[in-house]
Image (cartoon, grey):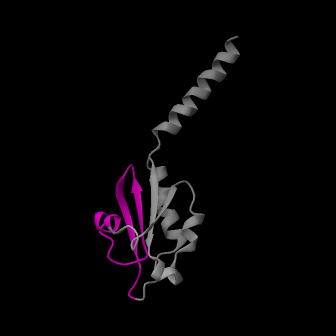
Amino acid sequence: MEFGMNKIITLLLLLFSFTLQAQITVTHFNADWNKANNVEWVKKLKDCDLSYVDIAKQPKLQAKHKVVVVPTIIIYKDGEEVERFQADISFKMAATKEEVQGIIDELIMSDF
């Protein structure tokens, strides 16, 4: 009976540790008129929730998040902006998938 209790306690500790981790969200802001510069690799980011905002269809979100150029990628931790990556003057994303994933990985590791 004691062995079963140890398994239950271990499982509960694992579940509890997952609830302590921060919520990391990555939002990709762009517009239909800039579809040619869509950042396709955003969909391949790991260990985060992803969302997409078309600023032409959701101008209130554009204003709220102060997006001045598209595409823009913003990383949030527990709802607070942590990092922002913006397109260059030609409306192309200068940041790489590795840079963005690196920030996500650092945020995850900072919780341990």
Any part of residue 93 in sight: no
Q: Position of residue 8 (x, y in %)?
A: 63, 22
Position of residue 85 measured from the top left corner of the image (x, y, whole percent): 40, 72
In this view, 56 is above or below 104 = below
| Residue at the bottom extreme of this rendering | 90
- Residue 22 lies, with reference to residue 13, above or below; the image says below
Q: Residue furthest front?
A: 57
- Percent x, y of residue 83: 38, 64
Q: Quadrant of residue 4?
A: top right
Q: Is residue 48 left or right of residue 86?
A: right
Look at 46% across and 60% down and name the residue there.
Answer: 26
Is 74 situated left or right of 2 in this image? left
Image coordinates for residue 72, horizontal then vertical, percent: 41, 72
Closer to the camera in the image, 57 or 70: 57
Query: How many numbered marks appear?
Result: 0
Q: Would you say residue 9 is visible in this rendering?
A: yes
Image quadrant in which you'd find residue 66: bottom left
Q: Please name whichever residue, 56 or 22, is drawn nearer the observer in this view of the structure.
A: 56
Residue occupying the point 57% across, 71% down: 41
Q: Residue at x 36, y 78 (%)?
A: 69
**Residue with the most extreme top position:** 1
Residue 57 magenta: no
Looking at the image, which is closer to me, 90 or 110? 90
Up/down of 17 relative to 44, above or below: above
Residue 64 colored magenta? yes
User: What's the magenta region?
Assistant: 60-89
Q: Quadrant of the N terminus?
A: top right
